[in-house]
Amino acid sequence: MTHYTLNQWQAYIQGDELDRASMDNHLLECDACMEIYVIVLEELNEILPQITNIKAFSDKVFTEIKSLPYKNTITQQAQSNKRWYTNTFFHYTIAASLTILLVGSGIFDQMFERVSQISQQTEQAQKSMVSDPLTNKAGQWLDAIPAKHAKKEGKP
């Protein structure tokens, strides 16, 4: 990529440079030259003419923009290259169809029943895990009570 010099950017800003189109494109692509351009623009700020009537200037710019021919080549080209299966509407249609199919076939009901069974089995397993040791401890404690009383009374 060829970079432009400080003097070339000064000539460009003052309207003297002949190759304006390539310099315009270069400014869009090159950050280093954009920085030089901004520096030169700030230096030439005092020399450049000032806008006295901003409203008239902006109206003139909008008039110029409106007179330019409208080219929608980018969107037309993008739409022509776009395949039917990459369309978002197509994806939503497939998702909605699959959802209706699964709801209609009862898959979700079977899944819900299976999840309920698993959660009940898990709860029972947790209860048995917690309650079994407690029951065993309580049983051992109760069994030990008569043995203690028998020893105190002198019975074997």
Image (cartoon, grey):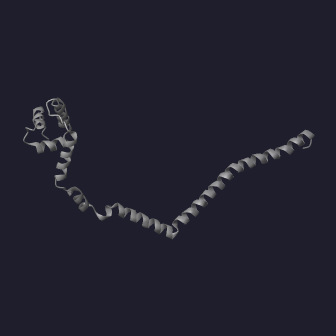
Q: Residue at x 10, y 38 (%)?
A: 15
Callout count: 0
Residue 84 horizontal/vertical position (percent): 30, 64
Residue nearer the viewer, 49 or 77: 49
Left or right of 87 on screen, residue 7: left
Q: Is the N terminus in the top left, top right, bottom left or bottom right quadrant?
A: top left
Residue 83 horizontal/vertical position (percent): 28, 63
Res 9 → quadrant:
top left
Residue 54 horizontal/vertical position (percent): 21, 39
Residue 87 versus residue 152 in the image, above or below: below
Q: Residue at x 92, y 40 (%)?
A: 153
Q: Residue at x 68, y 49 (%)?
A: 130
Residue extending farthest to the bottom is 105
Residue nearer the viewer, 76 or 122: 76
Res 42 → quadrant:
top left
Q: Residue at x 54, y 63 (%)?
A: 111
Residue 155 horizontal/vertical position (percent): 92, 43
Residue nearer the viewer, 90 or 142: 90
Q: Is the C terminus in the top left, top right, bottom left or bottom right quadrant?
A: top right
Residue nearer the viewer, 148 or 36: 36
